[in-house]
Image (tube, grey):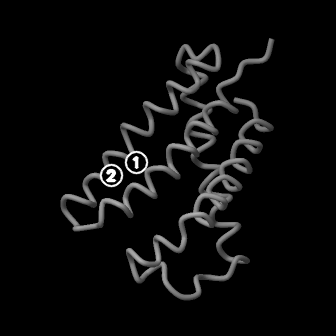
Amino acid sequence: MSAARVAAAAGASFAASSAWYAAFGERLARLDEAYAGPGPSPAVVAPVELVRSGVVATAVSVLAGRLPVRGPRQALALGAGLWAAFPVVLLTGSVVHEKVPWQQAAIHAGDWLVKLLLVSSIVGRRSR
């Protein structure tokens, strides 16, 4: 596991997620009042999200190191597999069991797909 790659992946994940929710925030606010109005201070959100992204990047890095991930295609397959196994399963459950609008779940699923593909592509690369 490369600490530099984990840090780079966490930072990239944070940046990509920030851009994602900047693009879809208005739509989320129309779907769920929890997203309407002012949110928590960026001084609180940024460190929390960086830590969360670091945890995900570390976990993906450990998995990539223990699996035969040897190139970009395999790294992206790992990210896609993790996306299908975890966020998609959890978000589908929220739609079916908690009546979350499917559009809201789709926005979150898209964020997770981007994050996991990005993180896996960064930490899954092997040095030559």
Give coordinates of residue 36: x percent, y percent: 49, 84
Bin the neighbour count of mark 1 within 10 Å (Cα to Cα): few under 14, some 14-19, many 20 and up. some
Q: Amino acid at mark 2?
A: Leu
**Residue at image x 36%, y 37%?**
85
**Residue at image x 25%, y 60%?**
95
> Secondary structure under badge 1?
helix
| 11 displayed left or right of 95 | right
Labels 2 and 1 touching (C-beta < 8 A) = yes
Q: Which mark is residue 64?
A: none
- CA distance separating discs 2 and 1: 5 Å
Decide: is 64 above or below 105.
above
Q: Amino acid at mark 1?
A: Pro
Give coordinates of residue 10: x percent, y percent: 69, 48
**Residue at image x 70%, y 42%?**
9
Q: Name the residue tied to disc 2.
A: 90
Give coordinates of residue 22: x percent, y percent: 63, 67
| 79 displayed left or right of 124 | left
* Rendering quarter of residue 57: top right
Q: Quadrant of the C terminus?
A: top right
Bin the neighbour count of mark 2 within 10 Å (Cα to Cα): few under 14, some 14-19, many 20 and up. few
In this view, the residue in front, 56 or 97, is 97
| 39 displayed left or right of 102 | right
Q: Name the residue tied to disc 1.
A: 87
> Secondary structure under badge 2?
helix
Decide: is 114 above or below 15.
above
